[in-house]
Structure formats: C-alpha cells, structure tokens
Image (tube, rainbow, N blue to C red):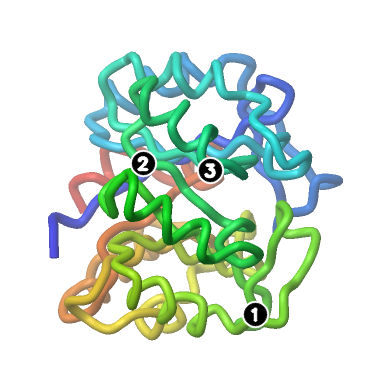
C-alpha cells in the first residue's frame, strides 16, 4: 500500500465551490466563487492531491465544469476528477490536459465492460472506480438513482479486471459531518488487491485519525475531506499531520 493520502475536496456547481447535504442538489451551500483559488490554498497548505467533482456534470451526464478542473491541474497539485464522465473521449480529454486520475461512477454500474476497456487503455493508475452507496447498494446519476447491484459486488468485479483505485462514498453520511462509515470501506476490497479512499461524513480531526488508524492492515489508503474544512472544524494542515 502507498502512503496514506488526504484529499481535500472541491465540488463544482455553476462554476462555484459548493457542498451538498447527502447528495441533495436542493441542499447546497456555496463556499466560494473561485474553485481555483481554493485549490491554490489547499496546495499551499501542503496537499499533494485534490479531489474535484463536477456536480453539474454528474447530473447532466456530460462535462460542464471541465475548464475549472484543468486550471486547477495546471497549478501542479495532482487532481482526480469525477462527474459527467461518460465516454472514452471524456477520459482522454482530462488525462491529456494534466488531470492525474479520472473517477468513473455511474458508467461503471451501467457499462462495466466499457470501463474495463478504459483501465486497459489508459492504465489502472489513471482510473478510479467511484462507488457511491445507499444502504450498501450502488447509486448512479449524481446519486439520484439507486441500482440493484451491491457495492461490494461492483468492487469485486473491477478488482478482477485490474482496477487499483476505488472511492467509496456512503451517501447517508456525506455532508453530514457525522463520521464516516469506516467498516463499509474496510470490507469493500481485500487487502493487497486495491486501494480504497474513504469519502463522506468526516466532521472532526478524530474522524481523520480513526480512518488513518483503520488503514493499518486494510485496503484503506486515503480520505476525502470537504465540508469540515470549509466550516473550519479543523485545518488541512492538522489533517495532514495528525
């Protein structure tokens, strides 16, 4: 397993930096008009990676805030992006414009074989399988629909096809600051087969410490932090050094 990573999050909607409560587009808080300036702040604080999500893209099924993502990637910080990525051209566009990893969510549920071809063409290091779950079932289309596939079953399939990176988001905890669902992340894939990044529910520095502790002997390799940073529950510097 690689070094444990902290991924500060920037969610994009209407070109602004926002957060949603439990994935609900009707419960949005705007935290800044300049996502690129936010990215600069995170980089200045010492972050190696940035997690960006095109919420408009996730909802509409196409790239909408891509230019903002590319501007952030030009800063030098490594960027992984999700939301609205539906085609081979989408993946190629981001990777050719400086993005380090592309997150595939809905498409991984609906067209798994196509996503397997992305892993084969672009390399497993550049493709992240994003699994968003409601009650253990994978959700799609910006969390507006729930599939009939258990999240663990989706993960097992992609591990068997060579996937190395997963993000597991428990929708029930996302944006709530109520603590992450660590156990679900630990159970997603077997140790040594792939890495899982925890997403959703981080509210305190203790939550970050708990995820980091859970990484020992498990597939957990990082954590995404969003709302807690914007609401100043703790600083990114504290998260990076805890």
Q: CA distance from mark 2 to mark 1?
A: 24 Å
Q: Secondary structure at mark 3?
A: strand
- Tell me where residue 20 appears, x and y as whole percent: 70, 46
In this view, 198 is above or below 134 = above
- Residue at the spot 27% in from the left edge and 34% down from the top edge: 47
In this view, 161 is above or below 184 = above
**Among numbered discs 3 and 1, the one appearing first in the sequence:** 3
Q: Secondary structure at mark 1?
A: strand
**Among numbered discs 2 and 3, the one appearing first in the sequence:** 3
Residue that mark 1 sits on? 137
Residue that mark 3 sits on? 82
In this view, 216 is above or below 128 = below
Instruction: Verify CB contact (< 8 Å) between mark 2 and mark 1.
Output: no
Q: CA distance from mark 2 to mark 3?
A: 9 Å
**Among numbered discs 2 and 1, the one appearing first in the sequence:** 2
Q: How many marks?
A: 3
- Residue at the spot 69% in from the left edge and 61% down from the top edge: 140
Residue in front for this viewpoint, 227 or 138? 138
In the rendered image, the quadrant that contains the N terminus is: bottom left
Decide if residue 59 is on the left or right side of residue 175.
right
Residue in front for this viewpoint, 95 or 100? 95
Residue that mark 2 sits on? 101
């Amino acid at each position: 397993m690689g070094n444990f990573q902290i991924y500060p999050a920037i969610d994009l909607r209407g070109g602004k930096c926002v957060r949603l409560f439990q994935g609900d587009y009707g419960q949005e808080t705007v935290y800044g008009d300049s996502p690129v300036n936010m990215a600069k702040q995170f980089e200045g604080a010492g972050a190696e990676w940035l997690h960006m999500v095109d919420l408009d893209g996730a909802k509409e099924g196409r790239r909408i805030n891509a230019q903002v993502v590319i501007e952030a990637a030009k800063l030098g910080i490594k960027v992984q992006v999700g939301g609205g990525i539906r085609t081979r051209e989408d993946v190629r566009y981001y990777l050719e414009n400086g993005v380090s990893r592309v997150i595939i969510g809905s498409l991984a549920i609906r067209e798994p074989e196509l996503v397997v071809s992305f892993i084969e063409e672009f390399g497993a290091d550049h493709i992240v399988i994003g699994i968003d779950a409601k009650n253990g079932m994978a959700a799609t289309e910006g969390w507006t629909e729930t599939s009939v596939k258990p999240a663990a079953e989706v993960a097992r399939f992609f591990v068997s096809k060579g996937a190395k990176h997963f993000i597991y988001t428990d929708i029930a905890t996302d944006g709530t600051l109520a603590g992450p669902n660590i156990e679900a992340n630990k159970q997603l894939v077997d140790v040594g087969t792939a890495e899982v990044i925890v997403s959703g529910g981080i509210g305190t520095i203790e939550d970050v410490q708990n995820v980091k502790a859970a990484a020992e002997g498990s597939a957990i390799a990082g954590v995404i932090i969003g709302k807690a940073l914007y609401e100043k529950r703790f600083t990114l510097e504290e998260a990076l050094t805890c």
